[in-house]
Amino acid sequence: MLHYQVIENGKENVVFLHGFLEDSTMWNGLTTDLPFRIILIDLPGHGKSKPINSSEITLFEFAESVTKIIEKECQSTSFSIVGHSLGGYVALELLKQERVKPEKTILFHSHPWADSEAKKAERLKVVDVIKTNKKMFLNVAIPHLFYKPELYSSEISHLISSAMEMDSFSIAATTLAMRNRGEYLEVLEKNKEEICVIQGEKDNLIPFHKMKNLYKKIKFKGYFLEGVGHMSHIESPKEIVRIFKQELKS
């Protein structure tokens, strides 16, 4: 069972899934302003959840673990889900499995595409680096998440320190799970009425024009934030609280 906590700020259930190298504390700056019953989950190998013990773990297994918590905490009541980056991939996998059905899914700086061949090769290089120099990898990867990292030195330092507490095997196994995930375009199109995408104009990980083109083609709900990278909960928290309140209220 994964580690999780529940914050009783309201009646409506909202499950929050963090991104790669993060944990459920990433939402701390937002939770006091959100009027929901907030379920914060640490994904496998992250935060206070147990380290991953298999290099062959899949996002299917990530989603299965999250499903158990949803079934326990939400039971017959409805819920929505917010997934940041990796957490968005897990949310799409939940939609694909169809074992539990969220009323609304917010893909928060996340996307439905599988890795390109170039990205898959890059993931393998990451695995090799992590084995020998985890700190070097984190010192490069985490600032890259921000549009203007020089403005967020204390936040970046905290994120690096937290990620350093993850064991290298869990980081590598999660990297491989992301590398081996499938395409979720059909899942997004099938559920487009219940999906909302939040995308940063200056996100270094997700091409802005590519998401804009997909938005025009599939016509899901989308928010495209100017002057924001991959971490808008830090870069533009008031706007994110506003969007969450607007999109997650039934």
Image (cartoon, rainbow, N blue to C red):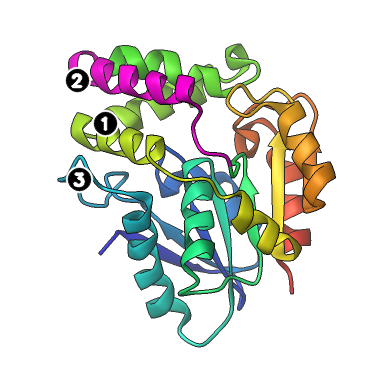
Of helix, strand and loop, which one carries label 1? helix
Q: Residue at x 19, y 20 (%)?
A: 131
Of helix, strand and loop, which one carries label 3? loop
Where the N terminus falls, by quadrant?
bottom left
Which disc number belongs to residue 38?
A: none
Q: Magenta part of the protein: which range? A: 113-133
The one nearer the camera, 91 or 185, is 185
The CA distance from mark 1 to mark 2 is 8 Å
Majority SS type along the magenta span: helix
127 drawn magenta = yes
What residue sits right under mark 3 in the picture? 51
Residue sitting farthest toward the left = 53
Task: Using the image, determine if residue 151 lies above or below residue 64.
Answer: above
Q: Residue at x 33, y 63 (%)?
A: 65
Q: Position of residue 27 (x, y in %)?
A: 52, 48
Residue 211 visible in image: yes
Residue 133 in the figure: left or right of residue 8: left
- Lower position in the chain sequence, tag 3 or tag 2: 3
Quadrant in the picture for residue 188: bottom right
Task: Using the image, determine if residue 35 lies above or below residue 16.
Answer: below
What residue sits right under mark 1 in the picture? 172
238 drawn magenta = no
How crowded pointer 3 is (Cα within 10 Å; few <14, some 14-19, many 20+) is rated as: some
The amino acid beneath tag 2 is: Lys
Of helix, strand and loop, which one carries label 2? helix
Which disc number belongs to residue 131?
A: 2
Judge depth for marks 3 and 1 and give the one in front.
1
Q: Residue at x 46, y 45 (%)?
A: 182
The CA distance from mark 3 to mark 2 is 15 Å
